[in-house]
Image (cartoon, rainbow, N blue to C red):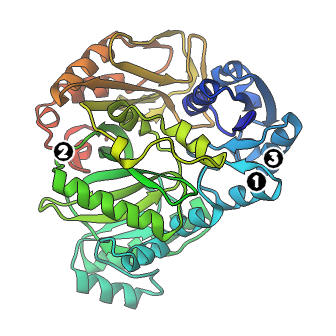
Amino acid sequence: MFNKILVANRGEIAIRVMRAARELGIKTVAVYSDADKEATHVKYADEAFPIGPAPSNLSYLHIPNIINAAVQTGAEAIHPGYGFLSENHHFAAVCQTWGIKFIGPPADAIEKMGIKAQARQMMMEAGVPVVPGTAGTVENIDEAKRIAEEIGYPVMVKASFGGGGRGIRVVESPNELEEALERASREAKSAFGQGDVYIEKYLRQPRHIEIQVLADNYGHVVTLGERESSLQRRRQKVLEEAPSVAMTPELRAKMSEAAVRAAQAVNYTSAGTLEFLLDENGHFYFMEMNTRVQVEHACTEMITGIDIVKEQIRVAAGLPLSITQDDVELRGWAIECRINAEDPANQFRPSPGKVTVWQEPGGPWVRVDSGAEPGYQVQPFYDSLLAKIVTWGRTRDEAIERMRRALSEFHIEGVKTTLDLHKQLMNDEEFCAGRIHTNFLAERIKGA
């Protein structure tokens, strides 16, 4: 096992990783930009190292500075968290070059699954269902028109690289296609440096279902059930739960088998998530693979009792998974609400500033993952996530009721937050009945 690891991230996920490391008896190194010198994750770590100015491209995304921090502090491994460099195959390869373990999948697996058009083709070859569309990228408008006519409108134009909802356009009719191609390609090139796009059928009201996998270097692949992430705002997840009300034992088995085939197709190791769309007829389709720990991994931990981050660290250290598939048992229900420093009344604009009051909820079966505290400065340079509240119940109704109580106990002042949005959702009749889909928020919440 490692003696010391560096966490190449900030905020709640940095602290989450450090907590797992501490339980394993591993020392931790925090890195911080000039803006984060007094941040909570810096105080929590055993030691901390500066990595540059506030802009992320000069600090948290600056590979030489992070490698230097690891070398200078004697860290044997780097955990990237999520976001930033977590799915950067070049970073994973650089770590290997310097003899530093990357706590995540191999660089080639990240690269293969990061190019979405290529990943679609690989999944088709592995027998994993994919949404009808192009096998690869679209070369020109004539090809795009032909394929769109074949699969039928509406269609989606999607960036082959990147994520986060960028480089995506919904096309309802042929006369919108050319402009959508140009805009999606332009946005993708600006955001990810690559303008390649592909086309797939647009499903109007699907559920977003994801299967959590863990894989080690000894051929063991374990699935930990599903999460539902259908509540999204502009394709950014807002609330997640596990399991899904749409799931049956038979469907879970089929989706889990598909997830295992997908992981094996790229010789995957570490924690990963296979994301699928589930239509109203119970048909599921591969969408993408997230080659990192997910923001919503806590939901799965709550219903399985399995520490996903510890398993990541074990695998990176060359150890086998500490569990087998027979050890996995789904118990009860978990719901996760993401609390962001955003103003829902003002088009969800970020709300940077100083947190003057921070009082977290507590009590039985309530988990809060956060990097904030009284006096915390919400920076304009980074993601606005302040905290994740996760509640567990024996049933979905009990988890919802417990979340209502937890949200009522959470008091934040100094910045605008999405607390009231989640309170509204917990009392929405359609949500409480489980009648949700990926366009749910857009249809029911003003400005979402």
Q: Quick one: 134 or 396, which is closer to the camera? A: 396
Residue highlighted by disc 3: 67
Amino acid at dot 3:
Ile
Is disc 3 placed on a helix, strand or loop?
helix
Q: Which mark is residue 159?
A: none
Residue highlighted by disc 1: 95
Q: CA distance from mark 3 to mark 2?
A: 43 Å
Name the residue: 56% across, 44% down: 312
Quadrant for residue 433, please give it. top left
* Local crowd size for mark 3, using a 10 Å CA cut-off: few (<14), some (14–19), many (≥20): many
- Label located before the other in sequence (2 or 1): 1
Q: Number of labelled discs?
A: 3
Q: Quick one: 221 or 86, which is closer to the camera? A: 221
* Local crowd size for mark 1, using a 10 Å CA cut-off: few (<14), some (14–19), many (≥20): many
Q: Residue 240: horizontal and vertical position, in percent?
A: 32, 38
Q: Residue 208: horizontal and vertical position, in percent?
A: 29, 52
Contact, CB < 8 Å: mark 3 with mark 1? yes
Q: Which mark is residue 436?
A: 2
Quadrant in which the N terminus appears: top right
Is disc 2 placed on a helix, strand or loop?
loop
* Local crowd size for mark 2, using a 10 Å CA cut-off: few (<14), some (14–19), many (≥20): many
Amino acid at dot 2:
Ile
